[in-house]
Amino acid sequence: MPHRTDRQLAADYVAGDTRAFTVIVRRHRQRMYYVARNYARNEQDAQDIVQEALLRASKSMHTYRGEAKLSTWLHRTVINAALDHQRRLERGGGVISYDDHDAVSPDSNRLLAHDPTASVEQFLALRQAVATLPAAQRKALVLIDVYGMSVEGAAERLGVRPGTVKSRRHRARESVAAAIAEG
């Protein structure tokens, strides 16, 4: 199947192609998570925010006019979901444990509290691991996983075949995972 743009996917989804939304999710979920993580106290909150944003996006895709990039529209959807999530927490007066339905103060369970130093350490380890990659692997990884380009788009930009980009990205991911596991 030929590569469809985000605008085409949105139009196809509104026209009834539910698989188009699956492609949108696959393409944008990671960046949506990064946005949500900036507003969340922990990973579970971030995941909840992304789920809420995706649900909202699926219900209101018909309002996407294509004037901005779909990624921008989804970014705004995540921010709105995150702000609503924060308001719910403020009104609720704390964190709810889903296991026993008792209110739990974030101070009483350190695992529920967001630790910004862990995020910084992970970011620095990731950054260092990516910096040690050969330039060709680093470019393939960054274009696809950071900038969200398709394999075909990255191949065109780099002047190589899509299969080359796939293998470079695969080797880059393996190297980064091994470097982080060692660190």
Image: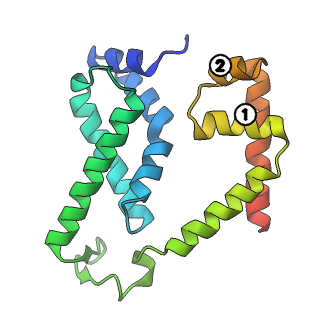
Percent position (x, y) of residue 109? 39, 85
Residue at x-position 28% and y-position 16%: 16
Q: Which residue is mark 2?
A: 152
Percent position (x, y) of residue 155? 71, 21
Percent position (x, y) of residue 64? 27, 24
Residue at x-position 39% and y-position 58%: 46
| Kind of residue at disc 2 | Glu
Query: Which one is nearer the viewer's eye here, 173 or 100?
Result: 173
What is the CA distance from the residue labelled 1 to the residue labelled 2?
11 Å
Query: Which one is nearer the viewer's eye here, 125 or 45?
Result: 125
Give the secondary structure at mark 2.
Answer: helix
Image coloring type:
rainbow
- Relative height, residue 165 to residue 169 (above, below): above
Percent position (x, y) of residue 10? 35, 21
Q: Which residue is mark 1?
A: 140
- Relative height, residue 86 to residue 5 (above, below): below
| Kind of residue at disc 1 | Ala
- Relative height, residue 72 to residue 20 (above, below): below
Image quadrant in which you'd find residue 157: top right
Report whether 2 appears left or right of 136: left
Image quadrant in which you'd find residue 12: top left
Give the residue furthest to the bottom: 108
